[in-house]
Image (cartoon, helix red, strand yellow):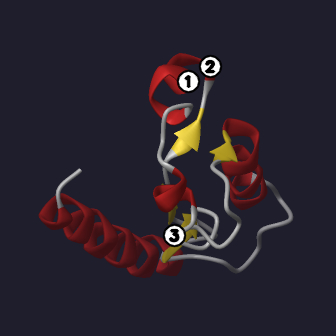
Amino acid sequence: MSRTAKAGLHGFNRSAAFSLGRSGDILTNVVSPGLTRTRNNTHITDTLPEAYLDTIPLVRLLTAEEIAAPVVFLASTANTGITGQVITVDGGV
């Protein structure tokens, strides 16, 4: 996704959080994942150079389950006040 598209999505999210939050208990957020190891991309992720992994504070790629955890929380009834945020889940890149 281009930087322009990301900026547009972030701006739309903030605008939606403001307008929808005023009309009720509607929360909007964006989850921005980093490169994620999945069953379908192992041919790419298994051949990453060590130099790339060294740029990630966790020194590994996250799994789809690790990306899903914040999404599940944000969509749950436990989230009562996080809105208009961009949550980056990328291992600290």
Q: Residues within 10 Å of mark 2 (few under 14, many from 20)?
A: few
Height in image: 53 above or below 67?
below
43 to the left or right of 68: left
Give the amino acid type for the residue marked by disc 3 in the picture: Thr
State how far apart marks 2 and 3 are (Cα).
Answer: 23 Å
Residue denoted by label 2: 39
92 and 25: which is toward the camera? 92
Residue 45 appears in the figure:
yes
Q: Quadrant of residue 6?
A: bottom left
Callout 2 touching callout 1 (CB < 8 Å): yes
Height in image: 21 above or below 77?
below
Residue found 47% across the figure and 47% down from its top? 49
- Find residue 70 and report its horizontal and vertical position in percent: 72, 58
State how far apart marks 1 and 3 are (Cα).
Answer: 19 Å
- Provide the secondary structure element on which disc 3 rests: loop
Tell me, for residue 80, which label it has, or none. none
Residue found 45% across the figure and 70% down from its top? 20
Residue denoted by label 3: 55
- Find residue 44 and report its horizontal and vertical position in percent: 44, 29
42 and 67: which is toward the camera? 42
Residue denoted by label 1: 42
State how far apart marks 2 and 1 are (Cα).
Answer: 6 Å
